[in-house]
């Protein structure tokens, strides 16, 4: 059964690989041409996602050939979606990682935290930019991909043909 499950996961990943590994403009970190791509589906209201940030940072420090692609998956609250939209606006301005960290460091992606992060990073947070059609399409695509891969929460991870769910920790991510 495990082999069958693994084969089905690999087939799903292979079918969606380009969509999984091609980041939204600027929503990635590490090596542009990484020999390994780690994709993480994340939500700013998720405490397990917040707990995974140091693991991602450590992996990036230790492996200069790693590329991490971030897929915003705001499924926990309206605040999550607003934060995801702000992160994608920041991504377009080359400020994804600073915004990503600021939103998680706030502990809660409420309007005060979003406004503070936007001001600190000089990222515009007007409704026109936040509700840009390309950002809406990205969020919809991420939800569709997550469903097709069978993800039902965050963080969820794709490395090669492996699917991982939850705050699996540095060791398991490194092994994958």
Image: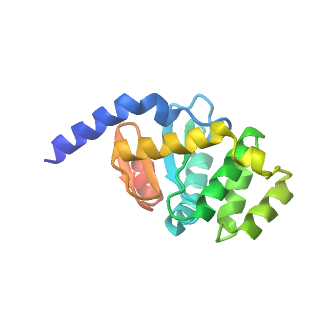
Q: Depth check: 67 or 46 in front?
A: 46
> Residue 8: x, y in percent?
24, 38
Q: Depth check: 28 or 84 in front?
A: 84
Residue 160 drawn above or below residue 96: above
Left or right: where 17 falls relative to 22: left
> Residue 63: x, y in percent?
56, 42
Residue 7, by quadrant, is: top left
At a point 52% along the width and 52% down the height, the residue shown is: 73
Q: Does any portion of residue 28 appear in the rendered image? A: no
At a point 76% along the width and 51% down the height, the residue shown is: 127
Q: Depth check: 130 or 165 in front?
A: 130
Q: Depth check: 101 or 72 in front?
A: 72
> Residue 83: x, y in percent?
66, 58
Q: Does any portion of residue 112 appear in the rendered image? A: yes
Left or right: where 74 falls relative to 100: left
At a point 50% along the width and 39% down the height, the residue shown is: 141
Residue 6 drawn above or below residue 43: above
> Residue 20: x, y in percent?
47, 36
């Amino acid at each position: 059964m495990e082999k069958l499950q693994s084969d089905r996961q690999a087939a799903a990943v292979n079918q969606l690989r380009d969509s999984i590994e091609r980041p939204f403009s600027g929503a990635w970190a590490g090596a542009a041409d990484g020999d390994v791509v780690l994709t993480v589906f994340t939500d700013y209201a998720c405490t397990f996602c917040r707990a995974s940030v140091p693991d991602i940072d450590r992996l990036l420090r230790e492996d200069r050939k790693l590329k991490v692609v971030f897929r915003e998956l705001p499924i926990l609250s309206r605040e999550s979606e607003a934060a995801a939209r702000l992160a994608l606006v920041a991504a377009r301005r080359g400020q994804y990682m600073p915004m990503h960290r600021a939103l998680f460091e706030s502990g809660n992606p409420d309007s005060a935290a979003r406004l503070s992060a936007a001001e600190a990073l000089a990222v515009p947070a007007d409704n026109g930019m936040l509700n840009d059609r390309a950002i809406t399409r990205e969020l919809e695509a991420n939800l569709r991909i997550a469903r097709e891969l069978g993800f039902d929460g965050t963080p969820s991870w794709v490395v090669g043909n492996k699917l991982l769910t939850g705050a699996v920790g540095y060791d398991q991510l490194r092994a994958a």
